Amino acid sequence: MRFRPLAALSVAAVSVVLLAGCSSSPEPTDTSSPGSGALCEAKLPAGAASDAVEAEGEVGEVPTVSFSAPLEIEDIQSTVLVEGDGEQVSEGDLVNVAFVGLDAETATELGSIGYAGSEVLPQQISAETSIGAFLGCATVGTRVAVTLPADTATGSGAQVYVLDLLDIVPTAAWGEQQEPVEGMPTVELAEDGAPTVTLPEGDAPTEYELAVLKQGDGATVAEGDAVLVQYQGVSWNTGEVFDQSWGSAPATLTTTQVVPGFADALVGQQVGSQVIAVLPPATAYGEGEINDEDLVGQTLVFVVDILGVQQVPTE
């Protein structure tokens, strides 16, 4: 695994770097029970360095971390400091985590993220990612101490992290069901939350339309935020699904990098919500001769489940 110091990273980059996939690491310890799978087996072993780390405070709050500095770190280690009593994570789950980093040489805090909420998007845990190696198949409420040796390639010094597993995030919107809006397309959901859209009879609307199907109670999406979503796009012109995240994995996007109508469906909505938006060409891919390849001239319908938001820091 390769890491840069936390202090050198923007909030948006921390989760990408610290929680990225593992390229190399010590052999994991086998903490699995029969049938528990690769995620349990991916948990890195504890060692003298990680065992030397202590953290005071409740899981979910920024801990006070202490160890005798300088701390000698020869390899990546992970020690369970608090074993949670919540649900056990499984391969592919989306999870919310928070962590604090310290310089192993001086015990100086480098920074923390995730404790204030909406600072980092939910992460997908698996045996192939660093977060999977740090936590394995831990239970919600678990806190681990992770030690990282110096990276000679980047010049980064040895570091210590305390990581809290906060909760498991549903892969579909979980908000309160709302009354359907007359005249809008209707949506039926499969057991996993995947939508099937039925278009009403008649011509496509000429004005933008938006309705909330499920009302969440999480953080509110603002312009410029990164958002984790499940989505499905249907062409009103053909009645066919032209794009969706269902069947693969939730998508991460920013509100400034999508077509205007899609952004308008996100900004102002709360995490946990599901919305449906009807986008005339002017709010989608533009007016013009209909072209199946680039969606120019088509009216589009998007059903969007908002699973998480990473808010842009304000000055």
Image: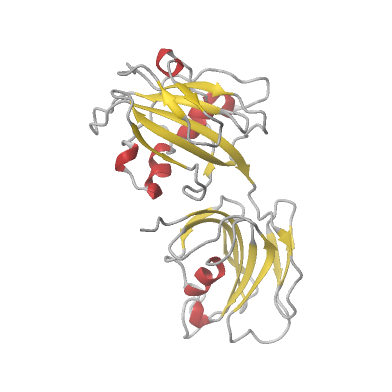
Out of 144 and 95, give the one closest to the viewer: 144
Q: Which of the image's four quarters has the N terminus?
A: top left
Q: Position of residue 46 (x, y in %)?
A: 47, 17
Out of 34 and 55, give the one closest to the viewer: 55
Residue 197 appears in the rendering = yes
Protein image colouring: secondary structure
**Which residue occupies 53% across, 46% down?**
122
**Which residue occupies 42% across, 29% down?**
161
Q: Is residue 276 above or below residue 309?
A: below
Out of 151 and 179, give the one closest to the viewer: 179
Horizontally, residue 224 falls left or right of residue 187, namely left
Q: Is residue 220 above or below residue 240?
A: above
Q: Position of residue 132 (x, y in %)?
A: 51, 32
Q: Is residue 179 above or below residue 3?
A: below
Horizontally, residue 205 falls left or right of residue 1, namely right
Residue 128 appears in the rendering = no
Total marks in image: 0
Q: Position of residue 192 (x, y in %)?
A: 70, 51
